[in-house]
Image (cartoon, helix red, strand yellow):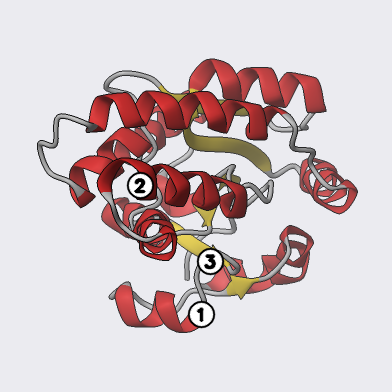
């Protein structure tokens, strides 16, 4: 039996806040304009490669294409406007407060830029113990997870990672962290078919985590 979770780590975009739809629309528009794909194909390509920074997504979709740098710059500029307009729902904030009351530590691990994540968390007064964003050589995945392990002195087996992408699930599996799939960006069938791992629970809303805590203790 695993130990009960002492730290729950949350992805940000598409997990704590519902940004993935607008981000996918922006990506679809830019890919159509600059690479000639249809809007629908570009949007799908963005979602299928989500979970890594956009400039890396473009390298997956269009390897070594000289347009990638400029398109990535345009995307980040447009994304910031959408990101800074987002709000954290009242129920999500209440859930984070409830986890704190239960003495479970919480953190954010995002591939949005680190300064933007910090600004957003401060502005929205998001009650997490630590918020991490993307910096050179410091990204969501093993680099963030290892930093969290050392910062909180909590082993991977006592952590849970909540994310909305297939990439999130694979990152958790890579280091042996228990995973909870937030549905919306992908379906439960998408996770089951694409992530070869042991059973993991799924949720539609963050507040459902509170009903899963006992189950997470025994996964």
Relative to 169, is 122 on the left or the right?
Answer: right
Residue 40 placed where, x, y %?
Answer: 43, 65
Which residue is pictured at 31% across the width and 75% down the height?
194
- Residue closest to the eye, 7 or 80: 80
Helix, strand or loop at label 1? It is helix
Q: Which mark is residue 188?
A: 1
Position of 128 with respect to 69 (left or right) is right
Disc 2 and disc 3: Cα gap in Å?
28 Å
Question: Disc 2 marks which residue?
Answer: 31
Who's the residue at 47% across and 71% down the image? 1
- Indicate left or right for 188 with 67 as reference: right
Place residue 73 in its image quadrant.
Answer: top left
Q: Position of residue 214 (x, y in %)?
A: 68, 70
Q: Earlier in the sequence, mark 2 or mark 3?
A: 2
Instruction: Work out whether residue 129 can be spotted.
Output: no
Cα separation between marks 3 and 1: 8 Å
In the picture, residue 116 is in which quadrant?
Answer: top right
Observer-nearest of 114 and 127 = 114
> Which residue is tagged 3?
181
């Amino acid at each position: 039996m695993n130990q009960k979770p002492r730290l729950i780590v949350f992805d940000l975009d598409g997990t704590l806040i519902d940004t993935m739809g607008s981000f996918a629309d922006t990506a679809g528009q830019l890919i159509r304009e600059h690479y000639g794909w249809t809007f629908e194909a570009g949007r799908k390509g963005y979602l299928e490669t989500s979970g890594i920074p956009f400039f890396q997504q473009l390298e997956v979709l269009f390897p070594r294409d000289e347009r990638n740098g400029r398109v990535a710059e345009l995307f980040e500029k447009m994304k910031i406007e959408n990101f800074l307009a987002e709000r954290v729902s009242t129920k999500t904030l209440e859930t984070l407060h409830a986890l704190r009351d239960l003495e479970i530590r919480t953190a954010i691990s995002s591939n949005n830029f680190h300064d933007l994540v910090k600004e957003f968390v401060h502005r929205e007064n998001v009650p997490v113990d630590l918020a991490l964003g993307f910096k050179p050589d410091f990204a969501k995945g093993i680099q963030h997870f290892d930093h969290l392990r050392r910062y909180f002195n909590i082993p991977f087996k006592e952590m849970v990672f909540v994310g909305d992408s297939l990439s999130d699930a694979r990152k958790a599996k890579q280091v042996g962290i228990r995973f909870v799939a937030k549905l919306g960006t992908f379906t439960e069938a998408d996770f089951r078919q694409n992530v070869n791992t042991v059973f993991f629970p799924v949720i539609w809303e963050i507040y459902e985590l509170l009903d899963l805590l006992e189950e997470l203790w025994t996964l």
